[in-house]
Amino acid sequence: MATPFFSLYYKDSESPDEPTGRVAYIAGKKNGNAVWRNRAKRKLRAAWGLNDVSAVPYDVLLVANKRTVNQSALMLSQVLNDVLSQEGLLQ
């Protein structure tokens, strides 16, 4: 699912022993230098941490785009929460 600030991909967790899935953050080289990529991933990590997503049983991939670093982590968290709710990933 794509938003104006990031893209979210998910699939069922392959590890049935763990109740929660894994999360990965990606910021591509075509969007900026290392400073930009690290800042984008840091903001996505903060947005994920602000949500109560500890029981999401999916492996999640968050991909940053050019607009990610211009937004606050709180705003990204609200968009992420909306996307997770819309996709039915929150329990």
Image: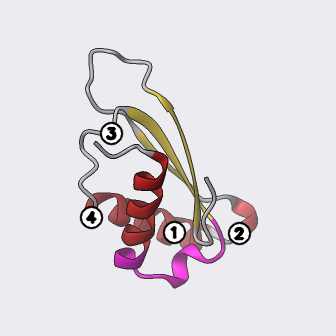
What residue sits right under mark 3 in the picture? 56
Q: Quadrant of the C terminus?
A: top left
In the image shown, does 34 or 47 lie closer to the viewer?
Answer: 47
Q: Residue furthest top?
A: 16
Q: How is the image coloured?
A: secondary structure
Question: What's the amino acid at mark 1?
Answer: Ala
What residue sits right under mark 4 in the picture? 50
Q: Position of residue 32 (x, y in %)?
A: 68, 72
For the residues marked 3 and 1, what is the alpha-carbon distance in whole angstroms? 22 Å
Is-magenta flag for residue 72? yes
For the residues marked 2 and 1, what is the alpha-carbon distance in whole angstroms? 10 Å
4 or 1: tag closer to the N-terminus: 1
Q: Secondary structure at mark 4?
A: helix
Res 74 → quadrant: bottom left
Mark 2–mark 1 CB contact (< 8 Å)? yes
Res 89 → quadrant: top left
Q: Secondary structure at mark 1?
A: helix
Q: Residue at x 60, y 65 (%)?
A: 3
